[in-house]
Image (tube, rainbow, N blue to C red):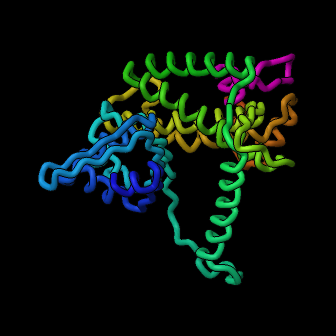
Amino acid sequence: MKILGDNDGIGLLFESEGDTLSQTLKSDYGNYSDVLRKAFHHELVSLSRRKDREYCEVANPRVSVALAGTPEQVRRLIPDAENGLMSRFCFYIIRFKRGIRNVFATSDISQSKNAMFKLLGDKFCHLHENFVRQGNYSFSLPSDLQEHFIEYLSRVNEECCDEVDNKMQGVVRRMGLIAYRIMMVLTVVRHLDNVIHKSSSDETVQLVCHEFDYSVAMSICDTLLYHAVFIYQNLSGNQSKRFNTVSQETGVYARRNTLYNMLPDTFTKKDYDAAVLTLGENGSTANKWIEAFIKDGKLSRIEQGKYRKIF
């Protein structure tokens, strides 16, 4: 809290072991779980210690947390599905892959990882400076994308409540907020890449989300939501009618999204088969995905053997 206060409420936490944060949340120095939950919505957070009569308050916290860990470490961090942290984190389950990586496969050691991250950090710092220099920003979605956004979340919310649990509604709602924030980030990056003048700090820059950035953000959250279902079921012990094999299907779902993103806006069955072959997917399995795309509202059948994407 003191670090946040000293840094104008901004904090970035990376931990390669989830247990590190779990132990912090259980410490005697305050309810850090409450801090994380409130920080997600930028609500005022405060911490007081009776022993030292210390009081710390952050009015507008902006905190990002990136964690890596095992399923059991997730359970120690978030004991049950009704814990507020569950819906505030994005989860991604990495499929198990047996084997040993050949660390000698490349001879290119001209640049260390630290040097590469330093270059990326310098680039990000430059983008951030430009972002701040241009003043205030206003972000909006075009009306057609607003309609699609509400329709998508309404449909997904019904599916999750019907097939998993009514309490999944909180996860879906916050995933909508996460999707919107991703759209804002992508829109700002696009703006900074294309800006050709420096605005006065008194101006308000009007940013309108591009359809491509919207599609990318929704595709990301579509995948994240599926992974969230898996975590929710593991924490609650629930088994749904539709997602009871989610641990096996999570990778399949991601592969389906990869295939979908490869396809042009309008395509034929021949184009689809070529994309399937490029990805090395099983033909008969991939054929079933077409009907799944149509059912999910991602595709429409124009005529026999011809399809159009729905954004």
Residue closest to the far left: 51
Report x, y in % for residue 172.
49, 26
Q: Residue at x 27, y 41 (%)?
A: 79
Quadrant hosting residue 307: top right
In the rendered structure, does residue 30 fall within the stretch colored magenta?
no
Report x, y in % for residue 177.
54, 30
Report x, y in % for residue 250.
53, 41
Quadrant hosting residue 255: top right
In the rendered image of this protein, does residue 31 appear above or below residue 243? below
Q: In terms of depth relative to the viewer, which is nearer, 72 or 25? A: 25
88 sits left or right of 284 in the view: left
Quadrant hosting residue 41: top left
Q: Residue at x 38, y 54 (%)?
A: 70
Q: Residue at x 59, y 41 (%)?
A: 252
Report x, y in % for residue 185.
65, 42
Q: Residue at x 45, y 51 (%)?
A: 65
In the rendered structure, does residue 295 fall within the stretch colored magenta?
yes
177 sits left or right of 290 in the view: left
